[in-house]
Amino acid sequence: MSKQFKTFISQLSETNATLDYFTDFGKIKANINKISIKLNQLNYLIGKEDLKLAVEELFEENAKVFEVLDILIAVRKNKNAKTFNREGKIVQLDSYFKTADKIYEFIKDTGLGEIFRNKNITNLVDYVFGVEVGLDTNARKNRGGENMSKAVSRIFDKAKIFYKKEVNSTDFPEITSLGADLKRFDFAIKTKVNTYLIETNFYNSGGSKLNEVARAYSDLAPKINQYDGYEFVWITDGQGWLSAKNKLEEAYNIIPSVYNLTNLDSFTQKIKKEEILTF
C-alpha cells in the first residue's frame, strides 16, 4: 500500500449526514396529502365496539377509502405484498380490500381491530405520518449520495468554480468510447486545459456494490482519459470503503484523479490555476 493511498484511506469520513438527511418531511407530507381524505374517513372506525358493522356502513358509503389500509401496517402498494390467508393460500394483500367481509378479516387478523376498539390510535392522519417517518429511513441510503453531491457543490461554490450538474455523455459527442449507453455525470467542469467529468459517491457501510463501483470506474476512466482535453475525476468518501480497500486501491492506482472530501481542495486549486470557463 502506497503512502499516498494510506493517507487517502486515513481521511475517509465517518459520515456526510446533515440534519436533513435523517427524515425527508417534505416527501412525507406529500405522501400524506395524497391519502388524507381517505384516512379521515377511516377515522370513523376508531372506538367502534361493533367494528364489523362499522366496516359495512363505511364500505357502503365509500368502498374506496379502504384502498389505503396497507399503509396502516407499514406496507406500500408498490411492494406488491403477498400473504397467507386463513386457508393457507398465498394471496395479494390488496385482495382483502374488495369486500366488507374481507376488509373486516384484514383489520381483525392484523391486530388493527383491537387498536381501533381501544382507541390506541386517535387520528389516522397523525398515525400514518409516524408510519411514513419510519418507512422513510429506507431512503437514507439514497440521500447519502445526494448529501455527497451537496457537499461537493458547497466546496465548488466556496471556491467560486463554475460547474454543471447531471451532465449527459451525449453533450460530448467526440467521446465515442462509451458506446451507445447514455452516461450521466454528476458534475462537469471546463477549464482552458481540460473538461473534467466527475462522479461522486459516499458509502457509510460496505458490501459487494463497492467492488462493482470501483471496477466500473476503473474501466470508465481510461475510456475518457484517452481523449485530449478530457479527464475523469472520481470523488468518493465514507468508511464503508474500509471493507473494500483492496479494490479501492486498485482503482486508485488506475484512475489518476481520485479525491475525497478532505483533499478535494487540491483539485479546486489545480483547476483554478487552469482558468475555469463557462460552457
Image: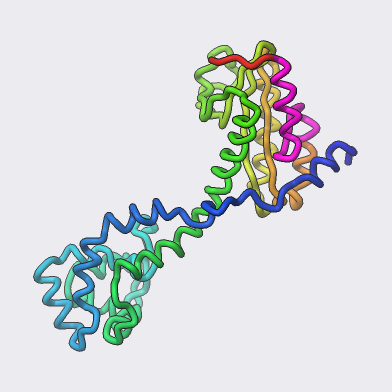
The question of residue 270 being in magenta is answered with yes
Q: Does 240 sit above or below residue 162? A: below
Q: Does 197 sit above or below residue 118? A: above
102, 133: nearer the viewer: 133
Residue 137 screen position, x and y as percent: 50, 59
Q: Is residue 148 left or right of residue 102?
A: right
How many numbered circles are shown? 0
Residue 252 screen position, x and y as percent: 77, 35
The question of residue 192 being in magenta is answered with no
Q: What is the basis of the colouring in this image?
A: rainbow
Q: Is residue 21 left or right of residue 235?
A: left
Q: Quadrant of residue 104?
A: bottom left
For the N terminus, the image quarter is top right
116, 244: nearer the viewer: 116
64, 25: nearer the viewer: 25
Q: Which residue is painted at 78% across and 46% down in the image?
A: 245
Q: Which residue is painted at 66% across and 22% down in the image?
A: 223
Q: Which residue is painted at 54% across and 43% down in the image?
A: 146
Residue 190 screen position, x and y as percent: 61, 17
Q: Quadrant of residue 270?
A: top right
Residue 103 visible in rendering:
yes
Residue 227 visible in rendering:
no
Q: Is residue 160 left or right of residue 253?
A: left
Q: Which residues are magenta?
A: 252-274
Residue 198 screen position, x and y as percent: 62, 29
